[in-house]
Image (tube, rainbow, N blue to C red):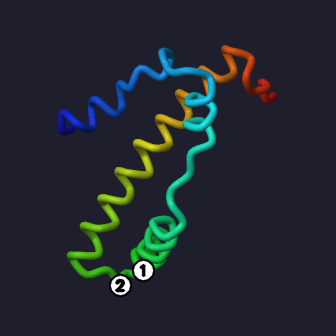
Amino acid sequence: MAEIDRAITKLAIESLPDEKVLALSDMQMETQQQEVFSNLQARYREGQLNDAEGSQLDELMQVYRCGLVSKARALKVAVERNLKPVFN
């Protein structure tokens, strides 16, 4: 994992103000990026990806995973601060 990736993953979410924590907990992939990601996943399932598309899918998967981890961490902080309800 590159240094930049580590820095993003270790972002001190706990030190962010409430509004930033809430924004991060509601974060989603950009619409265009999500469409490309979904299309590449579908082509992957059908066995139709070329090497360049496979690399692009790998990159988008990394973006998705990092975003998901950050979102989950922000949600945890938001719940701890009573900014969001606890779901059962």
**Residue 19 image point, x, y percent:** 62, 29
Q: Name the residue nearer the viewer: 17 or 46.
A: 17
SS assignment at label 2: loop
Q: Mark 2 or mark 1, which is nearer the start of the sequence?
A: 1
Which residue is pictured at 32% across the width and 80% down the height?
49
In-image side of 5 versus 15 (left or right) = left
Residue at (63%, 32%) from the top-left corner?
A: 22
**Circle 2 Cα neighbour tier, 10 Å, few/some/many (<14 / 14–19 / ≥20):** few
Q: Residues within 10 Å of mark 1 (few under 14, many from 20)?
A: some
In this rendered view, identify the residue nearer to me: 13 or 57. 13
Q: CA distance from mark 1 to mark 2?
A: 5 Å
- Where is residue 40? Give x, y as percent: 41, 74
- Residue 5 vertical placement versus 57 (above, below): above
* Residue position for label 1: 43
Give the residue pinned by disc 2.
48
The residue at 79%/29% (across/down) is: 87
Residue 14 located left or right of residue 4: right
Label 1 sits on what residue type? Answer: Arg
- As drawn, 63 above or below 26: below
Disc 1 and disc 2 in contact, CB within 8 angstroms: yes
